[in-house]
Image (cartoon, rainbow, N blue to C red):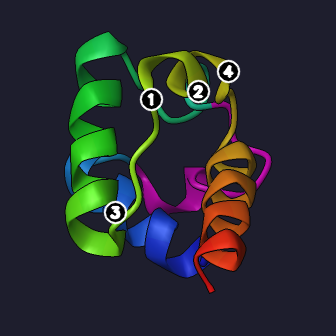
């Protein structure tokens, strides 16, 4: 799941691939702003079929948070 999320982040935010790690802070390390967050959420939904609510999105701080959230949704869907 990390690789999928990583590719989505890199392609949507045009950020340095080396900066996108599980521990990377989305604002500090990746450069995510509020508009980017909405775009990223749409890209995750279109690519993986899972989206976060606005409230959930506010709680996401790192790339790892996204991965863990999506993995939890994926296991519930199975």
**Side (left or right) of 61 relative to 45:** right
Real-space Cα separation, disc 2 to disc 1, in angstroms = 5 Å
Real-space Cα separation, disc 4 to disc 2, in angstroms = 5 Å
Q: Nearer the viewer, mark 3 or mark 4?
A: 4
Residue at point 68%, 52% (across, down): 69
Answer above or below: position of 68 versus 52: below
Q: Which residue is mark 2?
A: 56
Dot 3 surroundings within 10 Å: few (below 14), some, or many (20 or more)?
some
Q: Secondary structure at mark 2?
A: helix
| Dot 1 or dot 3, earlier in sequence | 3
Q: Which residue is mark 3?
A: 8
Q: Nearer the viewer, mark 2 or mark 3?
A: 2
Residue 16, position as x, y percentages in the image: 42, 52
Count every numbered label the image shows and give the total.
Answer: 4
Q: Quadrant of residue 27?
A: top right
Q: Secondary structure at mark 1?
A: loop
Q: Which residue is mark 4?
A: 59
CB contact under 8 Å: marks 4 and 2: yes
Residue 14, position as x, y percentages in the image: 25, 48
CB contact under 8 Å: marks 1 and 4: no
Q: Secondary structure at mark 4?
A: helix
Real-space Cα separation, disc 2 to disc 3, in angstroms = 18 Å
Q: What residue span does the magenta drawing correspond to?
A: 16-25
Q: Quadrant of the N terminus?
A: bottom right
CB contact under 8 Å: marks 2 and 1: yes
Q: Secondary structure at mark 3?
A: helix
Q: Which residue is mark 1?
A: 53
């Amino acid at each position: 799941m990390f690789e999928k999320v990583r590719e989505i982040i890199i392609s949507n935010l045009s950020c340095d691939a080396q900066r996108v790690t599980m521990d990377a802070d989305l604002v500090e390390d990746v450069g995510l702003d509020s508009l980017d967050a909405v775009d990223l959420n749409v890209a995750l939904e279109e690519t993986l079929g899972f989206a976060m609510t606005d409230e959930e999105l506010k709680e996401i701080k790192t790339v790892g948070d996204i991965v863990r959230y999506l993995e939890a949704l994926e296991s519930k869907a199975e």
